[in-house]
Amino acid sequence: MQILTTPTTDIFVIEIPKAKSTGGGVLTPAGAITHPHIDYHGAAQLMYHIHGRKLWLFWPATTRNIRILLERELREGNPIELPEAIHVLEELDVLLLEDTQEAFYLPAGMIHAAISFTTCSHAGVYVWAIDEYLIAQDLVNYHLSFATESIATHIPSTVDCLDLFCRDIDSLELQKWEALAFANQGHIHSTAILEWVKCTRAQLHSLIKDRIGADQVLPDETVGQSKDGKKRKKSQLDPSRQSTKRKQT
């Protein structure tokens, strides 16, 4: 885990209007335990420890770790608890922060958990770093694969909220990566990111079409015909819908 003692400039951050929050603060009581989880799909975080004595536990986004975490969370509907995670997840790293203010960088896809020994507070801001998009790609693809399987096997935990699930992937990930690629045209990854976003949106549309019918397929980014026959630019998936993914830090 990288403790930030000097400014870092080797990441790209999207400028987002102040009215749209991309982070927040957390206050936890003594004895609080946050079980292992990943925030969003591919966003890194700049974390700032403000107060208290807190133990952070981290696991990298290896194929094995992601499979265990997401299958428990998505298939069984019960997130893996910390004692079990310590035994079954690989490459555990820990960071103990005392009552001093420190910042650290939480890479994209990093599984993390925390134990508060005293009343603690920290703040964080989400960062979409262009060099980490492959992690986001893997996590989103895993979710899409599971959603496709859920439709075929009728797993209620995903099928029942498929519409919001697809909207979340678009508003919480694809729109951010798309904006990042456009802002950094010429970067070695920008073309690949835009192609991935395009293909993933097509998969989302297909999932919705298969589940709820063609008349409710989410809009895409192309120019199409409205019901009155006039050409119009279709909007992005509605980002105003509330996310159903629980945000934990």
Image: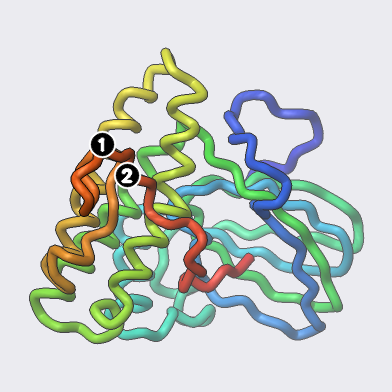
Residue 99 seen in render: yes
Dot 2 falls on a residue whose secondary structure is loop
Say left or right for 79 vs 140.
right
Q: Give the amino acid type for the residue marked by disc 1 in the picture.
A: Val
Say left or right for 45 vs 205.
right
Question: Residue drawn at (85%, 78%), measured in percent from left and top?
Answer: 118
Residue 80, percent from left and from top:
44, 79
User: Could you say which disc has been placed on residue 234 in the image?
Assistant: 2
Question: Residue drawn at (43%, 57%), measured in percent from left and top?
Answer: 238
For residue 41, above or below residue 128: below
Residue 235, percent from left and from top:
37, 46
Dot 1 falls on a residue whose secondary structure is strand
Residue 177: name its quadrant. Answer: top left
Question: Residue drawn at (76%, 58%), measured in percent from left and top?
Answer: 123
Residue 146 seen in render: no
Measure how far apart labels 1 and 2 are at the Cα level: 6 Å
User: Could you say which disc has been placed on residue 223 in the image?
Assistant: 1
Is 163 in front, or is 85?
163
